[in-house]
Amino acid sequence: MNAAERIYTASTREGETAARMAEILARRIEDDIASLRPPPGDALGSLRDLAKRYSVGRAVIREAIGLLERRGLGSLRPGPSGGFIVKMPQVDAIGEELADHFRAVGLTLSQLLDAREAVDLMIVRLAAQARPSSMALGRLELATDADDIHGHLALRSELARLTREPAVMPFVKCLNALTMDFAAGNPEASDYPASVPLATADLRRALAQGDGEGAAAAFGGLHGDLFRLLRPRESVAEPQVEETARTSDERTLAALVARRLASDILQNGSAGQRLGSEWDLCERFSVSRLTLRQAIRLLQDSGLVECRRGRGNGLVVRNSRMTGTIRLLLAYLIGQQMDVRSAGTILFQLNCFMPALAVSRADAEQRAKLEELLLRVEQGDVLERFDLLNFVHFVSRVADNPVIDLFSRCLAAYEARFHPFLAERLPVTLQASYFRLMRQLLDQAGSGAGMDLARMKEEAARVMLEMSRSRPI
């Protein structure tokens, strides 16, 4: 297995066992969509055509198509002129599924605020880099027409559009949905801060000049305004669920059964809980075994369940994993035909505060581990790309932000999967500034003089933004 495949697997599989044949086939079809770039509405072929093209049985191709349908990349249309029809994944649906994942893992307000700060400053800088037209900038003022928190969120959505980077819109949609969760029930959320029009005017001038840092500074005050409107929640929001009912389309019925089971898991499930045997679930939902198995495959792709064979087993709830959500987001990027060269730039900017957060939050054992891993990657003249990834993943875990971690894993997986010249090894000098940053932060943390998190974040952002411009990975 080469470096690109190891990075992709580490970013998307999260300790899973070997991929099922249908998952492998779904990935092959995604790769063909990425390389052939068929426009939405084109047919890739009938089930018979696809089974022959990929040398698999009809059952496997049906299961793979079901996975791609869940990810929004297409749908199966019956009839002589039908087949698998390519579609564009819908960003609103992707953003809401991302938000549901973070609700399920119990995202805290502090984690949301950390992610919101990193993503918002990233889109401001990317928007400035895109040098939007005066007409596009005019829409920023329209975004502030709302007189409550919706104006804040609309402004961020508009900035995401100005970046012209497809990856950032689902990030913003997800964070906007989660922000509304934490604003719910707060009477102050209806008060729209008076600083917004002034800040928007300053922001427009900086964006027109392509001044990323000026735009970030103009946007900085809006963070405080928004954050003051949010309050911690005692419980996560419950997903909306459609009732199952008999329909003429078995795939639709399977999706409804999957949604009902997913709702039960998110509301009442715990890792290791047994949901019942195949026969139990067929009777519970009044569906055929074929329909139930289609629903279970969708839940397996989302990472919510696993099937255990044998007496006393059946469908079992898994620990909350991000694998299915990452695959969903990857399918969106494939459908949007994202430029793979942009992934590295966005990845660095997204992680601009993570080194500082990791060092400030690490306990003694975690700092010792950071020191050990840092020493390992610093040694020698070259380093294995996979060793660097392990180090970055550990930094992300210690920083304790599941939002940035998931977004970053998706971008790393996309780059590894579609970058044509991903080297197995990298000169250590290319990463020297990152290693110096980590060493400086660790030394500061171990000095006993106390840590100034604001200054640590400022220094981390300076280094990571510079690396985003040179894109050493």
Image (cartoon, grey):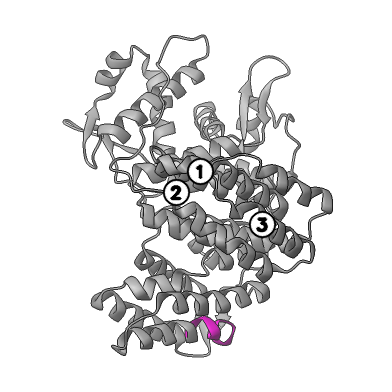
Q: Nearer the viewer, mark 3 or mark 2?
A: 3
The three-letter amino acid code for the residue at tag 1 is Asp
Q: Which residues are magenta?
A: 428-435
| Cα distance between the residues tagged 1 and 2 | 9 Å
Q: Earlier in the sequence, mark 3 or mark 2?
A: 3
Q: Are marks 1 and 2 in contact (CB under 8 Å)?
A: yes
**Above/below status of 282 relative to 107:** above
Residue drawn at point x = 35 percent, y = 52 percent:
108
Q: Are marks 3 and 2 in contact (CB under 8 Å)?
A: no
Give x and y (percent) for residue 116.
50, 56
Q: Secondary structure at mark 1?
A: loop
The three-letter amino acid code for the residue at tag 3 is Leu
Q: Secondary structure at mark 2?
A: loop
| Cα distance between the residues tagged 3 and 2 | 19 Å
The residue carrying pointer 1 sits among few (fewer than 14), some (14 to 19) or many (20 or more) residues within 10 Å by Cα, namely few
Give x and y (percent) for residue 454.
45, 75
Disc 3 target residue: 198
Q: Is residue 385 magenta?
A: no
Disc 1 target residue: 191
Q: Earlier in the sequence, mark 1 or mark 2?
A: 1
| 162 or 12: nearer the viewer | 162
The three-letter amino acid code for the residue at tag 2 is Leu
Which labelled disc corresponds to residue 229?
A: 2
Q: Earlier in the sequence, mark 3 or mark 1?
A: 1
Question: Left or right of 473: which side holds 205?
Answer: right
Question: Left or right of 97: which side holds 204?
Answer: right
Which secondary structure dominates the residues rendered in magenta?
Answer: helix
Give x and y (percent) for residue 45.
69, 29
Residue 472: in sight, yes or no?
Answer: no
Give x and y (percent) for residue 200.
67, 55
Q: Quadrant of residue 423?
A: bottom right
| Cα distance between the residues tagged 3 and 1 | 16 Å
